[in-house]
Structure formats: structure tokens, C-alpha cells
Image (cartoon, helix red, strand yellow):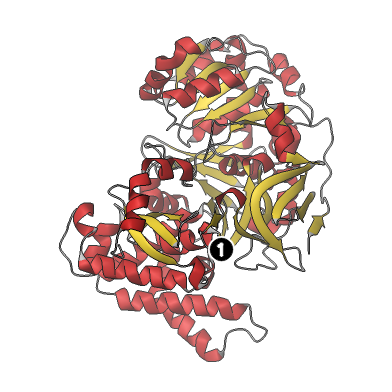
Amino acid sequence: MDEFHTPLLVETDPSDNLNDLFAARVRATPDRPVVERVTAAGTWEPLTARAYDDHVVAVAKGLVARGVAPGGRVGIMSRTRYEWSLLDWAAWAAGAVPVPLYETSSAEQVEWILTDAGVSLLVVETPEHAAVVEEVRAQAPTLREVLVIDDGAVDALVAAGADVPDEEIARRRGLAARDDVATIIYTSGTTGRPKGVELTHGNFAQLTTNAVEKLKEVVQTPGARTFLFMPLAHVFARFVHVLTIPAGAVLGHWPDTKTLVEGIGAFRPTFILSVPRVFEKVYNSAEQKAAAGGKGAIFQRAAKTAIVYSRALDTPSGPSPWLRLQHKVADVLVLSKLRAVLGGQVEWAISGGAPLGERLGHFYRGVGLKVLEGYGLTETTAPATVNLPGRTKIGTVGPALPGTSLRLAADGEVEIRGIQVFRGYHDNPTATAETMRDGWFRTGDLGTIDEDGYLRITGRKKEIIVTAGGKNVAPAVLEDRLRAHPLISQVVVVGDQRPFIGALVTLDPEGVPGWLTAHGKPPMSLAEAATDPDVLASLDKAVERTNRAVSRAESIRKYRILDRDLTIADGYLTPKLSVRRVEVLKDFAADVEALYESAGEH
């Protein structure tokens, strides 16, 4: 099938904006919690819809008092925390356009976004963030003021707005219509300067309202609550924080991914949304913990049983009685403990941002956590497709969401049209024209659509490698499988115009110590691990397993371990942990050459 359309389920008023969505939640359940925030004592404190609305209005008044005009740009540069969502809704209540900046942004990136978007007031999280801004403030002529959350920015805004009348906020809340810009999100992009994606009030309001209707049993069940730890500067997290409003769900924020499991356990969400790398880390951590405790073999058997059981669920006859018994035993010994670590209430997870892989999808479903893999981009306000609770096809990213059409171009490129497609790139009509075709957004991704309209992403159009022998290779298939190994952090497959496919590999600083302990080996540095015979033997086996998914011409013949990991701080990863391939290939060109010159296999 080359084209598929899912009709709209809920029609919204063209004059409505995100403030109307928020107001509807306040009217419907004024005394029920909307958010929970962490207190200084480390406990979770619920805020009702009415209390949250009062806080939003008070901060919005402060923005007005500080000179933010309707349509003005308000920058937010912070980790994911309660104040981020508060400032977002307050900016909309003041009639402004919030512009997110990653807290990891360099001074150069900050300067570009501030100047390109014309930010007038910027709220940052820490004095360190303010110092980064100060480096480029002279080059950002529209920036009038910088406030720091950790230095009392929210309280200062509330105090500043004490004399602004309620009527002014009520007036401003009604100014924007469906097609007006709600936010400008700068693509983290793997190449070139970030482009400002203009997303409208209608993009968010229509998409979230229809997504809630389609995914009711995930996001709208009694007691539904979700735990947000992805950066709110990313469109996926931003979509989630808006989605909880029409869903009637409770939202919790968590800024530190290093203590993620601790946070999830305390908050006890019913559904979570994440990128695949987090699901990989949770799996690898559990595997290593079991191995360190002498229970590695038990974990491996339980994991294999979970995967086999999940695969059997997709067969006409379902799991056999013997397999059901094995699964019950695995659940008692291992799987139930994993659910408990995640708070004991998590039933659903939505994965996006990169391919999850069938192995992890089946593993988590076998554990009892139903993973719905979806697909989207910044330009599509996050999700365009998602697997459905009633019918999940692991390995696909599901069918189009309501109000969305999919089609494949002649070369297999996925194109999208619908309620979530962006208005255009900010002040960049040339780029907008290049990415749109007759109202269809050209994603740059390659895929197939099955007879039920389920989309499968097969690669990135610009990343297709053509070997010297003329073989077209999609690196994502190899990279995703190999990166699942607990020793490995990142993988970059190479081979364009080369005689064979190779790979640059980095070791995981968090995964290596656990692997060494689990295998009875002494502690060692990453450099020492990179030459250890047992480590290399394990990587060899991982490459061998990875190659089973492709033909001989597409397989990895040699790999090389880099002397450091790829990080966001070094500019080699985007904030959603995608590899900036161009930067890596440029800076590690000598390693690529050595890969092809070397006679060794590592």
C-alpha cells in the first residue's frame, strides 16, 4: 500500500487555542490533581486544576508586567521540572510564544536561537545557564531580560504581576486562533544550523485531543498518571505535557535521568513515554544487576521466555499451556520484580524518537509492559503514527493517528499530511518549500506501509550508504541491533564508497563496570577494556548476531573502538541522543581510514 488515511475523530473549534484546552480541564475537574511536584523534602505534592491555573495566571501577569507583548517571544532554558510546564502555560496565557532552548546548548546555539526567534525575555534554570547566555548577550539585541529559576525567577514574576488585572490575562488568553504560532522549536538536527519549526495552537490542540480519543485506555483511565523525564525542549516531551491536559491525567516531572528508576518508583506512573535508549539502559542495567548477584542465567532464561511468550501472542493459537507455565515461573522469579522497580503500576509505554527494535518490544511486552512504538518529527508536532492498544504490530510504528495521511514517494520516502504538520520554518521560506510537496511533508525517512496501514521505517534517506560495489545499506538496522549490547554506547556504521561495511563503536562508561563484575573480571579503564580479550570476544559475538539480520554484502566486516564516548556536550549527539553522523565522520576520519587500512578485525 502506498497511501493510507485515518479520519479525524474530534473536530475542534477553529477559534480555539491551547488556553481553551487548559480552561476546559479546569472547568471539568477543578479540584482534581493536574500535576505533582517534588517538594524540598523529596515528597510528591499534588496541585489541583484550580491551584495550577491560579499559579499560571499569576506568572502570566508577571510576564505582562515585565513587558512581554502579545506574540512576544519568551525563551525557556531548563531541565524538565514543574517550572518549565508552568512557564509554558503562563506564556500562552500572556498571549506570548514560548521558545525552548536545551539546557545543554552551547553559547553559539543560544545566540542563534535568541536572535533568529527574537526572544525578548529568557528564563533559565541556573546561574551557569545565565553565564552561557551572558557570553552572547551583546549579539542578541532583542533580549531585554534574563531571569534564573534557581534564583527565584517564578516568585519574582508573581510579585511583579500583582497589579495586572485578571481581565488582561482573560483578554490575552483569547487572542490566538487555531492557525497562530504557539511555539518555535529549533530542530536539533544532525547536520547544519537548527531551523525554527513553527507549530500552531491547532497543531497541539487538535493532535492531543484526537490522540486522547484514540488512546483512551492508555492515557485516560481512572488514576492515569505519567512521568516526564525527557527534555521539554524536545517536541515529544512537549506533546506529552500538553496531552495530559485533555486526557485528565496527572503529570510528574523529573530532571535527573541518572536517578530515573528511583523517581519512577516513587511517582508510580501508569504510562510512560520515552526514547529507545532509555528502554535499552533499563534492560542492560537489570541484566547486569542479576549477573552481579549470581543470577545472570536465571535472568537470561526469564528474558528469553518473555520474548518467546510475546511472539506467541501474535500467533493465531497464542502461547501454549507449557509456555504459559514457563512465563508464570519467569514472572515470579524475575519479571514481577522489574515491574516493581518501575513503580508497580506501569502498564503502557510509548516509545518514539528512534527505532525500538523487535527484541526490546517483545521483551517488555513479555514483562507486562505494553510498548506502543510510534513515529514522528518536530515538524509533525511529535507523533504522526502509533501502534494501538487493540492491535500492536511490534516492529512497526503503527498506523496514522486521526486526521493524518501517510503516503510513500516513488523512492520510498515517507510523506505526511494532517492536523499536526507544521506551519513552516521560521523566516525560512526556502527550506519550507524544499520540505513540502503539494501539502505533504517530506520526512526524509524511508518506509513501507502494510495492508492495514501500519508503517515500518526502514532507514533514513540521507544516511543510505552505497558501497563501492553499489550495494545500498541502511545503517539504522545494524546500529540499533549492535547498540543493544550492554558494553556498547554508540555505533556509527560506515562504508560509503568503500569495499565493505564497517563500524565505529564506543564503549558505555556506565555499562562496562557492570559487565566486568558480572563476568568475574577486575575493574579496568575504558581504554583497558577496549583491548581486553574477553570484551573483544563479546563484541565479536554481538557483531555476528547483528549480521544475521542482513545479507553478507550489508554485514559489518570490521569494527573499531573509539577512544571516547560520543556525547551531547562534545556535539556528537543531539539532545534526543541521535548521532550527528556528519560531525563524527569528520572528526574521526582517521579512525575510518584505519578501519579500512587495518588487517585486524577490531
The front one of 462 and 137 is 462
Q: Quadrant of residue 504?
A: bottom left
Residue at 44% from the left image edge and 16% from the top image edge: 136
Image coordinates of residue 122 in percent, x first then y, are 51, 19
Image coordinates of residue 195 in percent, x first then y, are 60, 31
Q: Amino acid at mark 1?
A: Lys
Residue at 73% from the left image edge and 15% from the top image edge: 167
The front one of 120 and 3 is 3
Image quadrant containing the C terminus: bottom left
Inspect this view and state whether residue 115 appears: yes
Left or right: where does residue 355 sit relative to residue 151? right
Image coordinates of residue 187 in percent, x first then y, are 57, 36
Q: Quadrant of residue 317?
A: bottom right
Image quadrant containing the N terminus: bottom right
Circle 1 Cα neighbour tier, 10 Å, few/some/many (<14 / 14–19 / ≥20): some
Residue at 71% from the left image edge and 33% from the top image edge: 432
Residue at 30% from the left image edge and 53% from the top image edge: 510
The front one of 171 and 531 is 531
* Above or below, comparing residue 279 to residue 428 in the picture: below
Inspect this view and state whether residue 24 appears: no
Look at the numbered disc 1 and give the secondary structure of its residue: loop
Task: Identify the residue at the far left of this view.
Answer: 522
For the image shown, how many numbered marks are present on the structure? 1
* Above or below, comparing residue 102 to residue 601 in the picture: above
* Above or below, comparing residue 203 to residue 107 in the picture: below
Left or right: where does residue 360 sit relative to residue 438? left
Image coordinates of residue 75 in percent, x first then y, are 55, 23
Q: Quadrant of residue 521?
A: bottom left
Residue that carries the numbered disc 1 in the rendered image:
471
